[in-house]
């Protein structure tokens, strides 16, 4: 039922279901992850962070760490987001979303070379036209003026 609600973007119903489950079992990791995801999707990334911290205290689930990194990006805590992304990379959990997150962090640090590198990884490893490919393509195009301005 939760998957169906999430697939249909029925976040109110999905949140209600997650909270019902958490009332019965406060450490239910799938329900905690679902609640954090819903909060992040509805613009409440700051409220998702303590939930994801709790999930990571219970388990070292890579998806929770990735979600926390993006919640931290949304709340503009780029140093902590980088720490989460570096931890994923160090522990052998690379992903295209991790590369995209590292590109966003590098861009905020005005490190256009690293941002370009990570965005190009996304583009080369994602099917053309896929949502992540489109996001990476747009971000890369936005970086081009900064890269061109630095050339002699």
Image: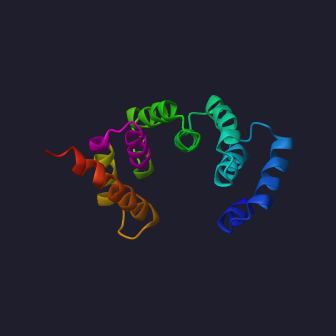
Residue 60 in the magenta stretch? The answer is no
In the displayed structure, does residue 32 sit left or right of residue 77?
right
The quarter in which the C terminus is drawn is top left
Closest to the observer, 39 or 115 = 115
Residue at the (41%, 65%) spot, across then down: 134
Range of residues picked out in magenta: 99-114
Closest to the observer, 29 or 108 = 108
Q: Residue furthest left?
A: 152
Relative height, residue 38 to residue 105 (above, below): below
Q: Where is residue 66 in the image (x, y as percent from the top left)?
A: 52, 43
Could you say which quadrant of the image residue 135 lies in?
bottom left
Q: Give the colour scheme of this rendering.
A: rainbow
Q: Where is residue 10 in the image (x, y as percent from the top left)?
A: 74, 65
The quarter in which the N terminus is drawn is bottom right
Relative height, residue 143 to residue 77 (above, below): below
What count of labels does the image hold? 0
Relative height, residue 121 to residue 81 (above, below): below
Closest to the observer, 135 or 18 = 135
Q: Where is residue 22 in the image (x, y as percent from the top left)?
A: 81, 43
In the displayed structure, does residue 95 sit left or right of residue 114?
right
Residue at the (54%, 34%) spot, across then down: 77
Q: Where is residue 98 in the image (x, y as percent from the top left)?
A: 43, 45
Residue at the (29%, 53%) spot, across then down: 145
Residue 109 in the magenta stretch? The answer is yes
Query: Which secondary structure is most common in the magenta stretch?
Result: helix
In the displayed structure, does residue 26 sit left or right of residue 130?
right
């Amino acid at each position: 039922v939760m998957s169906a609600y999430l697939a249909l973007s029925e976040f109110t119903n999905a949140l209600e279901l997650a909270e019902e489950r958490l009332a019965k079992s406060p450490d239910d990791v799938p329900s905690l992850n679902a609640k954090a995801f819903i909060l992040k999707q509805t613009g409440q990334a700051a409220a998702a962070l303590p939930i994801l911290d709790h999930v990571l205290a219970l388990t070292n689930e890579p998806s929770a760490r990735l979600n926390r990194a993006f919640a931290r990006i949304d709340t503009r805590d780029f140093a902590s987001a980088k720490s989460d992304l570096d931890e994923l990379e160090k522990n052998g959990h690379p992903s295209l979303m991790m590369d995209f997150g590292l590109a966003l962090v590098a861009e905020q640090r005005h490190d256009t070379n690293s941002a370009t590198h990570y965005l190009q990884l996304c583009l080369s490893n994602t099917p053309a036209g896929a949502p992540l490919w489109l996001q990476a393509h747009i971000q890369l195009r936005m970086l081009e003026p900064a890269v061109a301005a630095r050339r002699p």
